[in-house]
């Protein structure tokens, strides 16, 4: 499914715009394309989060979800910090929610999924965090 652009000795890069367009029906992509999408505060983070993406098993999924009965919420548990002082979360609930609802994007491999999770905001189609006045 993923479009890969390869160059000699360079890490493969996914065509972010193509992936976003192909998955524009998913709730988390719809929210990402809306510059006014709501956010939540996650313990251990310094800024509000709109999606807080994760990747595993070749899929990418949000840990901040728009739950049908509970509204927008973080589906994770704060565990503590690692050696570098970065927060650690258990996001099993978000993973299972994504798998059960289909609210995820499947990639050919873990590397592509991780790349998308870390870089999806660089898509020209994603609006969150772009042009907002503070």
Image (spheres, grey):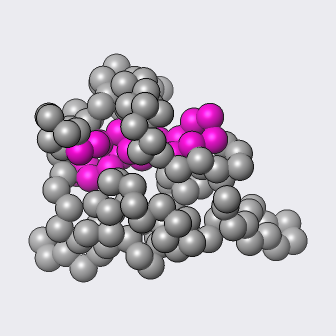
65 vs 117: above or below: above
Q: How many marks?
A: 0
Q: Residue at x 23, y 45 (%)?
A: 66
| Residue 38 placement, left or right of 63 | left
Across and down, in percent, residue 92 comes to 42, 24
**Residue 46 visible in the picture:** no
Residue at x 44% of width, y 79% of height = 124
The magenta stretch spans residue 125: no
Q: Which residues are magenta?
A: 46-66
Q: Residue at x 45, y 42 (%)?
A: 102
- 47 or 7, which lies in front? 7
- Image quarter where the N terminus lies is bottom right
Instruction: Tell me: 74 left or right of 104.
Output: left
Q: Is residue 70 left or right of residue 98?
A: left
37 relative position to 31: left or right: left
Q: Residue furthest right?
A: 8
Q: Return the x and y of residue 85 as percentages of the image width and height.
A: 39, 32
46 up-or-down from 3: above or below: above
- Percent across and percent down for residue 59 are 57, 43
- Of 34 and 9, the residue lying toward us: 34
In the image, residue 60 lies in the stretch drawn in magenta? yes
Residue 134 visible in the displayed image? yes
Residue 100, x across and y down, in percent: 43, 31
> Is residue 93 placed above or below 22 in the rendered structure?
above
Q: Quadrant of residue 115?
A: bottom right
Q: Which quarter of the rendering shows the C terminus?
A: bottom left
Q: Given the current orientation, which residue lies at the most extreme top position?
A: 79
* Residue shown at the point (16%, 56%) measured from the top left: 38
């Amino acid at each position: 499914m993923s479009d890969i652009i390869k160059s000699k000795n360079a890490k493969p890069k996914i065509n972010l715009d193509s992936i976003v367009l192909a998955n524009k029906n998913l709730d988390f992509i719809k929210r990402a394309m809306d510059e006014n999408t709501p956010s939540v505060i996650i313990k251990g983070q310094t800024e509000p989060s709109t999606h807080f993406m994760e990747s595993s098993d070749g899929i990418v999924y949000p840990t901040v979800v728009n739950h049908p009965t509970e509204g927008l919420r973080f589906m994770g548990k704060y565990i503590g910090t690692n050696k570098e002082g970065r927060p650690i979360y258990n996001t099993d609930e978000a993973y299972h929610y994504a798998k059960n609802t289909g609210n995820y994007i499947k990639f050919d491999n873990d590397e592509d999924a991780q790349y998308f999770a870390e870089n999806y905001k660089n898509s020209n189609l994603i609006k969150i965090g772009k042009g907002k006045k503070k």
